[in-house]
Image: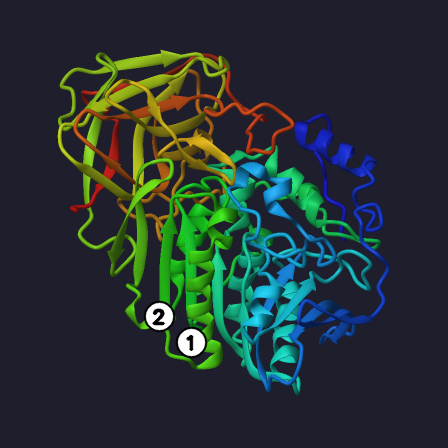
Amino acid sequence: MRAAARKKGSRMETGYRERLRAPLNSPDFRGARPRRYERSVVNGMIVERDVRVPTRFGFDIWIDLFRPEGERGELPVLVAWTPYGKHDPAPLATIFPASGVQEGWMSDFTIFEAPDPVYWTARGYAVITADVPGTWFAETEASYFSPREAQCHYDLIEWAGTQPWSNGKVGLSGVSYLSSCQWKVAALKPPHLAAINVWEGWSDTYNEIVRHGGIPETSFWPYIHVRWGASDRQVEDLWAQTVEHPYFDAYWRSKVADFSAIDVPAYVVASWSDHGVHTRGTLEGFKGLSSPRRWLEIHGGKKWAYYYEPDSIARQAAFFDHFLKGEETDLVDWPPVRLHVRDRYGEATIRAATAWPVEGTRYERLYLDGESGGLGALPPAAGSEVCYDPLDQQGCAVFDFPVTEDLDLVGHMKLKLWVSTDEGDDLDLHVAVEKLRPDGGKEGFAHWAVFEDGPVALGWQRVSRRALDPVRSTAHQPVLSNDRDEKLAPGEIAEVDIEILPSGTRFRPGDTLRLIVKGRDIFDHPKPMLYMRHEDTVNRGAHRIHTGGDRASYILIPRVDK
């Protein structure tokens, strides 16, 4: 892999050097065994380890193959494509006890974020878990979300669909990376691909993971591709490439699928709870699909628990049984969109819809008032401003809207701000929408995979990256071009449109909708706890948010009638 130019002395360069010193790239250090074929019969399954599958490039893919014991005829096939290692069972109830995954929901054969071979083989499926080419004890270099990786994925699907034990229909399953990779291979249209189940998979690595609103992510991103990159061969140095490619250029575009080319049946599951990782990308991918047979589900829980809980497994089975086995299931009764409108952590109303965004959404403005700290339906006549120290963990601007009638907010929000800084030439803005109970306490929601104190929604904006993509932006969803920096002079006032990621939440009379704007991460989970962080800040001097008069800052909210 090509070495990338690195900015010496930066946090990025420091993280890169620390990564090189760590032994994590050694497959045997990470628990992988050298490749060798083995066959056994256990738990009612024929298990074949380290089966070679050829690719068009002359190297092989390594898979583990699980099939039901005994004569079952031709089998539908589920494929899980993973960078984490097909050798590594992952008992989530043990390693992430706060994930909500319960003992008994998966067998000891289940690897990280993948379908359980014991469950699916008992249902009459073959299951394949495949290592991403170039990872672990590899025969080639590794790259992630690349065109070559997708082509290898295609070759595996076609191999699986043409084996004598296969019925010729292949489905894709898994969470996170195991879903994100599905977009690109489905766009290539493998003839034997019969259905995809994208379960929280980002679709644009740069805009959804590497940079949030143009602000570099400095914790999860450098961590996660070290988790992927165990190999005895060269691995794509994503951190170095991140430094070399600071804008959304051809390199990053090569990792984005052509969603309009995806016409295979798709069951897409997103969440309100995975802001900063999967929420945005899963929904953007769904919006771009051309398939007439597609279903969207959006939940408010923890992603791993929701994937493995029995009711979700039953819906996965109904989907795959229909498209891979040809059986009639309750899929015929599914609405096109099924989503949770949350009251609080663990409590939500399930709502059906025909489209995403939800039909009949009414976008309303709530104007910021710097004088009162309130939000209201009318813009303040007089101008005012709120000032805070962006480097102080306690420094922030807060605006409250007392709710007087039932209010269901479902969809995208947008924050229009007029901002300036007393010093420096740029600002990093971190935004949260929260729900307060009548007693003034914050209502917590599921957040990431393990937290229960999360917000309604989050947004981010580096002000120098405020230029919008005119093609992809809409009145309710600003999309950054991320192709240039436009710096400010001290005291210069800039107009910015901030994308607040989608959410679904119910407010009742007596509740309060609170808007928070800060110069740093709003959630300050201590290290080494895995979380997203944005420590490479450009902030200097006081931030000022201008409201009212000819600078009427506002938040656009998506009201949906019950």
In the displayed structure image, the side of residue 480 where residue 348 appears, left or right:
left
Q: Which residue is mark 2?
A: 331
Q: Secondary structure at mark 1?
A: helix
Which residue has dot 1 on it?
A: 322
Residue occupying the point 61% across, 29% down: 529
Which of these two is toward me, 304 or 211? 304
Disc 1 to disc 2: CB gap under 8 Å: yes
Q: Is residue 546 above or below residue 156?
A: above
Q: For marks 1 and 2, give the CA distance.
A: 8 Å
Q: Position of residue 74 (x, y in %)?
A: 59, 85
Residue 275 place in picture, x, y as percent: 45, 40
Q: Earlier in the sequence, mark 1 or mark 2?
A: 1
Q: Nearer the viewer, residue 476 or 465?
A: 476
Q: Amino acid at mark 1?
A: His
When the figure is inspected, residue 382 is found, relative to residue 195, above or below; the finding is above
Seen from the viewer's position, the closer of residues 7 and 282 is 282
**SS state under label 2:** helix
Write the residue at 61% across / 57% down. 145
Q: Position of residue 405 (x, y in %)?
A: 13, 32
